Image (spheres, helix red, strand yellow):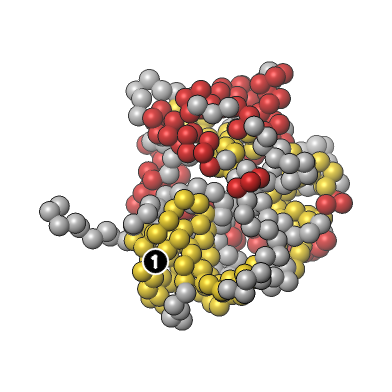
Amino acid sequence: MKMRAMKVFRDRDYVKTGESFFFCVVDEVHPPGRVTAYLKYAPEKGGGGRYRRALPFYSVPHVEDTLRFLEKNHPRYLFLDPLSGLRFSAVPLEDIACHYCPEERLRSLLAEGAPDDLERKARDLAVLLSRRGGVETQALGLTGSILIGLHNPRYSDIDLIVYGKNSSLKVRDALLTLYGEGDSEVRRFEGERLKAWCLEKTQLHPLTPEEAEFLYQRAWNRGVFRGVMFSVHPVRLDFEVEDAYGRKKTTPEGIVQIEARIQDDGEAIFLPSVYKVREVKVTEGPAVEDLTELVSYEGLYGGVYRKGEQVAARGLLEKVEDLRSGKTYRRVLVGSRAARGADYIKLLPQPRMRGE
């Protein structure tokens, strides 16, 4: 199985610049000559080979901090997108000194051995999910600090990649089975660890502790392996990427709140998470008739809502124009800078069926 064509940048790859900045790649669609990515690690002042996390949390306010840093010190890493009017970080190809691919990092650990305890656990978890899910190890990869060699074996997490929708669903099913086995080394968050995770989410997002715990219990891709927290992130294969830069133009139309029913959740496991919606009711903001998508760049809401469920959402209303066909539709975007971290997707109370 071929994971990617040459020189293709995929979601959660990393790139390193000449200043030794590490950027984490976002999405699979990038402007010509650039790679959309956010600054994750920067060298500590004074050198010494030490790094600081430029992005300590995945939230809009913290991403804004990285953009302000780049604006002041390295503005060439910012890009004004003519198709959306947004300015975001996108590394010019000529500034990329090294491209880190998650599948290559795992292949190296499998072939050459794992030097430290965290790398051994990461390798063993990948092998376990490969075996239990019935997927090849080459469909898996390692991202995050382990990918770029900045992990600390004492406290870093394990961040796994699964390439392709089919393999991702198999790994999801394997994890759900492992969580339920009494002798499994793969466990869900419990007790103080779960409480701390929920508290962190309430501080970063407009959620109550109960809503945060609901999201965790719905998620399948976060757990603990041999005492180490891990996450699993599905990423599209080349042939699964249907969009391309320049095909769509988006126009922001303000913050709205909606209620809607999930029509299709088939692309919700990826980033961005895409939910097709119907029966849309705008509860705050301009009433529109062609709102058909709920899209989230906030991974917290990815893959947790199911077809037929009713949700409430707050986010940026966008008009989307297909530049080839001229057709337009609208969507609500969660995770935009315009919403300033106050957007969300929440499950509404579901109507009881007759006889329940």
Residue located farthest toward the front when viewing the structure as drawn: 325
Q: What residue type is labelled 1?
A: Arg
Element type at mark 1: strand
The answer to whether 243 appears left or right of 287 in the picture is right
Say if 356 sits above or below 173 in the image: below
- Residue ID at (37%, 73%): 281
Q: In the visual, does 92 lie left or right of 4?
A: right
Picture coordinates of residue 172 (x, y %)?
Answer: 46, 36
Q: Name the residue under label 1.
A: 278
Name the foreground residue: 126 vs 228.
126
Which residue occupies the extreme left position in the image? 355
The structure residue drawn at horizontal position 38% and vertical position 52%, both measured from the top left corner, is 306
Where 112 falls versus 75 (above or below)? above
Q: Is residue 153 visible?
A: no
Where is residue 287 drawn, in percent x and y? 43, 80
Q: Residue at x 51, y 39 (%)?
A: 166
Answer with the quarter of the image where residue 196 lies: top left
